[in-house]
Image (cartoon, helix red, strand yellow):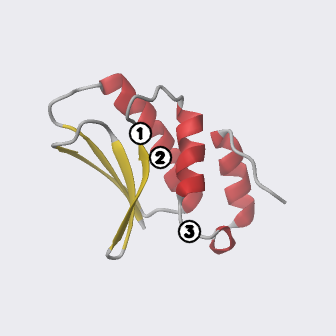
């Protein structure tokens, strides 16, 4: 599994990109992603995808949002289609709590 972060080639928002990347790095650690790839393209805003094999799922888009990194991280983790049972639950709980999320017992 890997994260793909697409940012706009035309509209540069370095501060916003740093906030989103901080959230993505924490979510990647939580979900056990092997790598994070960043690319620039013909997009209007930052989008975060999880790619696993031939499948690519959009888990976050930063369109007109001003969320802080913990909220973004929590959203990415909860939007992941990866079942919690396949994660190291104790590590998941610690890292999700670091995102500002909660784990149901």
Specify the farthest residue to the front: 64
Mark 1 to mark 2: distance in Å? Answer: 6 Å
* Residue name at image x 71 percent, y 44 percent: 97
* Residue name at image x 45 percent, y 29 percent: 65
Res 82 label: 3
Mark 2 to mark 3: distance in Å? Answer: 17 Å
Q: Position of residue 102 (x, y in %)?
A: 75, 47
Mark before the other along the chain sequence, 1 or 3: 1
Vertical order, 25 against 12 (above or below): below
Q: Which residue is mark 2?
A: 25
Q: Are marks 2 and 3 in contact (CB under 8 Å)?
A: no
* Residue name at image x 66 percent, y 67 percent: 84
Res 96 label: none
Front: mark 1 or 3: 3
Which quadrant of the figure contains the N terminus? bottom left
Vertical order, 84 against 24 (above or below): below
Vertical order, 105 against 16 (above or below): below
Along the horizontal axis of the image, is 42 left or right of 94?
left
Mark before the other along the chain sequence, 2 or 3: 2
Mark 1 to mark 3: distance in Å? Answer: 20 Å
Vertical order, 57 against 102 (above or below): below
Q: Are marks 1 and 2 in contact (CB under 8 Å)?
A: yes
Q: Position of residue 12 (x, y in %)?
A: 23, 26
Q: Position of residue 58 (x, y in %)?
A: 40, 56
Residue 4: name its quadrant. bottom left
Crowding at mark 3 (Cα within 10 Å: few <14, some 14-19, many 20+): few
Dot 2 lies on which element?
A: helix
Along the horizontal axis of the image, is 67 left or right of 8?
right
Q: Which residue is mark 1?
A: 21
Dot 1 lies on which element?
A: helix
């Amino acid at each position: 599994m890997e994260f793909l972060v697409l940012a706009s080639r035309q509209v540069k928002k370095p501060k916003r990109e740093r906030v989103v990347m901080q959230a993505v790095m924490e979510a990647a650690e939580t979900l056990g992603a092997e790598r994070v790839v960043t690319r620039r393209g013909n997009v209007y805003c930052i989008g975060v995808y999880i790619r696993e094999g031939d499948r690519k799922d959009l888990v976050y888009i930063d369109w007109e949002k001003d969320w802080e990194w913990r909220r973004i991280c929590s959203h990415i983790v909860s939007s992941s289609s990866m079942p919690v049972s396949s994660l190291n639950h104790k590590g998941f709980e610690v890292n999700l709590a670091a995102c500002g999320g909660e784990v149901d017992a």
